[in-house]
Structure formats: structure tokens, C-alpha cells
Amino acid sequence: MRTLHGEYRRHLRSGIRVPVVLKYANHAIQARTLDISSSGLRLKRPEHLYLRPGEVIDVDFPDNADLSVEATVAYTGKSHIGLQFYRKRFSDDELNELYDIAPSWQRLVASGKRALWRNSRRFAILSANTFLRSPIHALARPHFVFAVYGNRQQAGSYFTPWMAERMPSNLVLGFIRNADMRGLLVASQYMEDELEEDSEKVRHYIDQLRRDYPDAKRIALVGRLPNFVMKAGIEITDPLVEGSLGTRYMIWDVARQMRERPQYSQQTSIVVLGGAGRIGNAVCRDLTGLFDKVIGFDPRYEEDTELDTGKGTVLQTSKLSHLAEELLFIGLTTHGDAVLDLQQYISPGALIADDTHPCISMAARERLQAREIAVEKVVLSHEEFMMWPRLPAWNNRDIPGCLVEALVLLRQPDVVEGTFADFCQEAEFLGFTGRLISPLNE
């Protein structure tokens, strides 16, 4: 599921081993793949081959004369080399052609590994939510719960309809630790569209969380869940945490780092895509502490309005012409690929910091990259944070912004009574740091 645990990859690594020829600096070196995915290769390192991370090389597939790609060296080890394709992704047809080159026994092993991983994951979920559920609760004794949801396609990767009938409505899907604080990742069997359309299902989800975890000090609500909860007439009071302060801190910290990059150091303005939303409106005001002008772009604005916050100005607009000269963007649209409707109005060299759910897809990023528009994912990190299994498209050390508020409040319950600046100061003091990373190809 999008907000659930496990590895949900759009293209699974194949484990297929086929010959390749590496061409660089007038050299042609024969090698063999250890793994092939849509976005890169893992190779057995040939003897006397010395490549540095960041170098760009050509990769030819001699058994498929029409196939040749440019790749960047992502890492080098004693026995392996990792390559990431440069401005290229293998299509399903291209991957299938490579699979067909490999011996039948390799294809059988690869498909067996996929089936083993999928069934092992499903068995783990079934076990954790049937006969192991009570021991997990007793051992974890969670200080907090991270309440999440998914959609139907994602749910199918984690459990079958047969399993769903035999498990409770709220599923334990992961363990979280931050320093000495323990938490559980819990998802509803209700899908995102059901929670959006049926407030009764939202009420059932939240009521069951409170019954299952009466001793949890905080229940952090993911993504759009706070909106669903408020629509259902549920007041977000302790232990519920709507998470906006953590998200706002994450974006504020990332925006500060964007401005510090040499190529953007002269920028005095930034655009928030989705500026009329619950989070977006607050983010626009927050960022006037960093930029002279913040453009809150959103189709819901009917006319241009300029607001003076005392630190800077916020322009609330739906006019596409205001995007043309800007280079820094924060993505807060309802779904990431909505940015494709705006791409022709965004200048080459622009950077989009993506905090959308679901995030900007790999296919959309490729189209933006063709226009020289970069996309990086917004995350928060803490050296003592760990989530297992990890969230899809996340490192297990990275933290969703909507969870951070709960983690800060566990340490300093009174900080919510102060200003946004007070929260930022406390979050920074506790070691939470915003980061921009390359999106995972999932």
C-alpha cells in the first residue's frame, strides 16, 4: 500500500544475468549483469576495472544489437558495480526482451523469488494480525501509533480477499522506533476512496484505533486522513495528532536548504503548488520568513490576492503566467502527477521539492526531466529513527512529515501551545532534519 510497509516496486529486479559491454574513455570492457531493473543494473566487477561514482558510461547488450544505454556509476565495490540509467528507463517490452535472452532456468529462479517474496510478505501480515497480534501488542507496548491507509491496487500486494476476511479491520503492518519511543504502523482495511466517501467508515477506523491502543499517547494521522476525520465530525484532540506542524517544519527546513544551493542563492521567491490547501496555506505564510515573495498557486483561487505577513508577501493566484520566471517550487498538490498540467509554464532549470501523496511518478519525472525540470523528494530524518519494514518509496530511516509532530509532542507536549517558530526550534533541537533526496524508482 502507498502508506503501508514493504517493497512495492513498479518493476521488480530480475536477477537475470546477461552479457554487456561497457564503453568509456576509448575502452570496451566485457561484463555480466547480476541484476536488471527498469532504472539500472548491478554488474559483476571485471578485473582491473576502475570507475568512480558519478562517471557516465555507455552500456551495450551484444545479444540485443538495438539496445544501448547511457548510465551513471552509482556505486563501486570490490566485486560489484551499480549503474543508474542516465535519461532512460527500460520499458516492460525491453525488460521482457532481456528476460528472453537469459536461460530458462534463470527466468524460473527469478519468477520463483518474486512469488516467494510476495507470499512471505502476505504470510507475515496474516500472522501479525491473527495469532501473533496479541503478543506483538504486548511486546511493543507502543507509545504512539501511525495511522495510515492505501488503495485497492496497493492492498492487493499485501493481502488477498481471503486473508482480509480473517483479519481485523485495522491491520498492524510495521514497527517504529525513535530513540526510546516505540510505535506501530497501523492501516485500515478501508481503502482511501472509501474513507473519502463514507464518514461512517472513518469513524469506525478511529474508534477502533482508540479501543485497540488505549494507552498510546499519540495517534498520528497520515496524509489526507485529518481531512477525512474532520469531515466525519471528529474533533482532533489528544491522542489524535493531525500532523501539520511536522509537515510545515519539514518543508520550511527543505526550502531553506533549496535557497542555499549555489544555483538558487539569488532567488527571492518560491512557488507553493497547492497553496490553497489546509497545509499549503500555512506553508505559504511560513516561507515568508525565508523569501520576500511566496506564490501560492492553486486553481481554487478565483482572483489574485496579495497578503502581507509582516515578513514578506504571499500572492494567492491561479494564473499560470506567475509560474514562468520561477525556479523553486514546493509540490503540495492532491496527487503528484498533477504537476504535468503545469510543466509547459515552468522554466528549464527549475527544482520541484515533492511532498505530494501519491508522489510524482517515475514516468512523470522522466517527462519533466526532458524539459530540464528536476524533482526531488522531501523527507525528514533522525539518526535514532527506524521503521521496519520501510514505507514504499522511503528509506527506513526517513520519516513522513505528518508523523514528526507526534514524535516531538511525545518529548515536549507543551510545544503545540507555542508558535510555529517554537515548534521548529524544538524539532531542530531534538535532531529532526529536512532533506531532499532522489526519488526511489518504485
Image: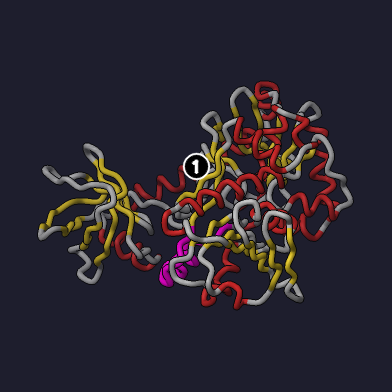
**Front-most of 287 and 17?**
287
Inspect the image, locate mark 1, and give the three-letter code of the amino acid beneath it.
Asn
- Picture coordinates of residue 400, whole percent (x, y): 61, 44
Please give the name of the residue rendered at 47% of the width and 49% of the height, measured from the top-left corner.
437
Q: Check disc 1 and report its element: helix, strand or loop.
A: loop
Left-right relation of 114 to 53: right
Which residue is tagged 1?
395
The residue range painted magenta reads 359-375
213 relative to 275, above or below: above
Q: Does any portion of residue 106 appear in the rendered image?
A: no
Query: Percent x, y for residue 277?
Result: 73, 60
Count the marks.
Answer: 1
Q: Is 9 left, or right, of 191 in this rendering?
A: left
Whether 334 is drawn above or below 154: the answer is below
- The colour mode here is secondary structure
**Foreground residue, 411 or 189?**
411
| Residue 408 position within the rendered picture, expressed as x and y whole percent measured from the top left | 68, 33
